[in-house]
Amino acid sequence: MKEVKSPKKPLIYYYGIVLLILFLFNLIVTPLLAQGQVVEVDYGTFMQMIEDKDIGMVQVEDSQILFTDKDNAVIYETGAMDDPTLTQRLFDAGAQFTRVVEEPMSPILSFLLTFVLPLVIFIGIGQYMNKKLMEQVGGKNSMAFGKSNAKVYVQSSQGIRFSDVAGEDEAKESLAEIVDYLHDPKKYTDVGASMPKGVLLVGPPGTGKTMLAKAVAGEANVPFFSISGSEFVEMFVGMGASKVRDLFKQAKEKAPCIVFIDEIDAIGQKRSSGGGMGGNDEREQTLNQLLTEMDGFEGNNGVIILAATNRPESLDPALTRPGRFDRRVPVELPDLAGREAILKVHAKKIRTADDVDFHTIARMASGASGAELANIINEAALRAVRDGRTIVTEADLEESIEVVIAGYQKKNAVLSDKEKLVVAYHEIGHALVAALQSHSAPVQKITIIPRTSGALGYTMQVDTGDKYLLTKEELENKIATLTGGRAAEEVVFGSITTGASNDIEQATKLARAMITRYGMTDEFDMVAMETVNNQYLGGDTSLACSADTQNRIDAKVVEVVKAQHEKARRILEQNRAKLDELAKFLYEKEIITGEEFMQILKAGGDKQ
Ligand code: ADP
Ligand code: ZN
């Protein structure tokens, strides 16, 4: 009970209502009932009535006397007096009278009745309402106020192994040591080595962090507790801390075991320095409890905490101090080989044609996470079913890459012919600028089938291998390619459309990064003017320079983009015939493959 502190309607609220009702009942109803039956009179009236022999039955009690008139029509009540002759006079008046000796109620019983009983009733009602409330807000588990709710997976039922996690070899290697420790702790304690208490899995969403944590438990054959950081900070003040306490209590009972805290950034964010607002207190309390628990247990008790986050830079430094989450395992987006392996793992669950080349598919899905790759396989299978086939083909997979990356084909969106032509020129503009510059990834496929994501056309470029370093020229060419769509509209129609908004955003981002982060301009040399806050989620940045410098950066961004835009326009003007030919092809077929594109480009014409 002591943890129950609802911010909205504390229990006292319900007790209050019950008390009020009882109070009103006493105040109004009881006297009403009584009044109907008994008339209160003074002792003189009583004596007068005896005198007049207008008296029926009399009941003498310690403190009061109840009596009726001769016809027994009305009951009267009066206070008792010290009146020694009363008996004689009543006898003379011919009344029927008795004396009732009240058994004094035992003090214990009266205490029970007046204090304990109501209290028991109130508490009972309170508990009932508490339970009701919990059922409404807390799901099925109504008794779990302050319980951790951690899901427990025991190896036998959920045996995920390292072999189920494709790629991520470095991560697996780091974690293998922990598995080994859980298998044979003695080997480590003999030398005096203690395992890290906490391991932080760091990487973008969908890269298999949860899978890896489960695999550690699966390989070590130990229980696996899993809870998400956001579950700690749910609804009631003080709940988070008590959930943490409960989680660790459970874990210690089941040791050796793995505790996995997903999205630890939900509780582990940097604590505010100056007294924050109420909302943060709860999170800080939870975090403090977690730190206390981690400090509390000795290194070798067999509880190993794995936590996952995709925002490592936002974590409170206290969490990553030695003795807490002092080991960090990066779980990065898969590279080409990794993507191929992941695709193959998931393809085992579906029936694929024998000739599917997963290497090509993996190349096309550059930048996809493990979760997206799993999704690509599933989308392909769904597509095969929709078409009434029982085997998934390579075309299904290619299509589903576009679906997962660019959104579904929007079959019913009708573009007017004029719009379709503009979109065709726009996309060919991108592709042509890309193809006519050196260092650009070859075009794989262009479509002008609208997507639910809002994109009207889509140019897919595929790098031949993974690229880790980009040269300044390559970045400039990328910007030129991005401006190529708009440039084509200008060259051909002399007017411009809204279709380039996404291109503009990307081009600006690239140009800005060249200046502020990659040190690629003479003006600012190798000075960092922006730092990346969030490496794994979109990479938003924060400025670290004066307002004056910001103005100069903005001007420089415009300069860089403008130069590339002009270059793109020049390329298209010089290749106007090819532009028209390719756009016409795309306009009619709505789709053009890389090979068709190159054929038309090379046929009869030479690069100018
Ligand atoms: P995270 O916890 O990093 O957000 P998950 O572990 O929940 O990612 O992964 C989501 C899904 O993506 C998994 O259930 C799995 O199907 C798939 N997946 C991700 N990475 C891999 C991988 N390396 N190998 C196989 N499947 C993966
Ligand atoms: Zn575009």
Image: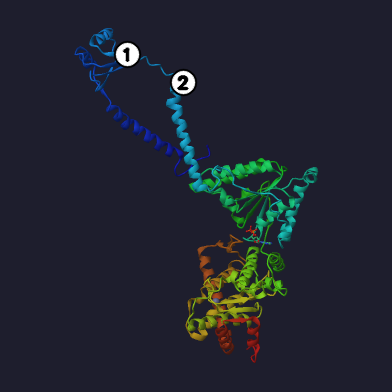
- Residue 94 is situated, as x and y percent measured from the top left of the image, at 24, 11
**Relative horizontal placement of residue 499, taking residue 382 as reference (left or right):** left
Q: Is residue 158 visible?
A: yes
Spot occupied by residue 357 in the image (x, y as percentages of width and height): 71, 74
Which residue lies most toward the left here? 52
* Quarter where residue 122 is shown: top left
Amino acid tagged 2:
Ile
Identify the residue at image location x=52%, y=85%.
491
Q: Secondary structure at mark 2?
A: helix
Q: Secondary structure at mark 1?
A: strand
Per the image, the residue denoted by label 2 is 108
Residue at the spot 51% in from the left edge and 82% down from the top edge: 420
Q: Give 198 or 471, whichever is nearer the viewer.
A: 198
Towards the viewer: 152 or 277: 152
Quadrant observed for ligand 1 in the rendered image: bottom right
| 255 w.r.t. 262: above or below | above
Q: Is disc 1 surrounded by few (<14), some (14 to 19) or many (20+) residues within 10 Å?
A: few
Disc 1: which residue: 98
Residue count near mark 2 (Cα–Cα under 10 Å), binned few <14, some 14–19, many ≥20? few
All told, the count of numbered labels is: 2
Query: The disc labelled 1 sits on which kind of residue?
Result: Thr
